[in-house]
Image (cartoon, rainbow, N blue to C red):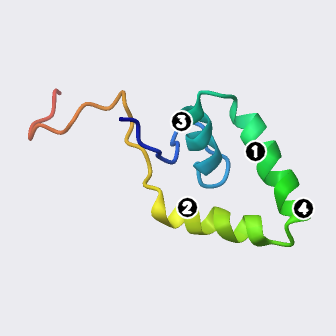
Amino acid sequence: MRKLFRSKTDSKITGLCGGIAEYFNIDATIIRLIVAISALFSFGTTVLVYFIATLFIPKAAYPEQPPYMGHHPY
């Protein structure tokens, strides 16, 4: 089962659009354009939903970072 996370690698403001794009496997620019156009026509509702979603959707961990095992490799 896939989970939705905010992206750390594809982040402009909070990483929410990047995380949604990774979840649906599409370009983040498309999501950002949809959010921007929606924000213009929704009288601020989209901005409110965006920041509420940012509070509830967790930030993704770096996949290339190994877990801490209690010692340093150097």
Q: Which residue is drawn at 55% across and 42% down?
A: 19
* Residue on which the image places disc 2: 54
Say if mark 3 contacts mark 1, CB within 8 Å.
Answer: no
Quadrant location of residue 39? bottom right
Query: Is 71 positioned to the left or the right of 37 in the image?
Result: left
Q: Mark 4 points at which residue?
A: 40
Q: Which amino acid does label 3 sit on?
A: Tyr
First in sequence: mark 4 or mark 1?
1
Q: State how far apart marks 2 and 1 are (Cα).
A: 14 Å
Disc 1 designates what residue?
32
**Which circle's residue, 4 or 2, is located before the other in the chain?**
4
User: Pointer 3: residues within 10 angstroms few (<14), some, or many (20+)?
Assistant: some
Q: Is mark 3 on a helix, strand or loop?
A: helix
Q: Which quadrant holds residue 2? A: top left
- What amino acid is found at the position of numbered circle 1 in the picture? Arg
Which image quadrant is residue 14 in?
bottom right
Q: Is mark 2 on a helix, strand or loop?
A: helix
Q: How far apart are marks 4 and 3 (CA)?
A: 25 Å
Query: Which three-letter amino acid code belongs to the residue tagged 2?
Result: Thr
CA gap between label 4 and label 1 equals 12 Å
Residue visible at 70% across and 29% down in the picture: 27
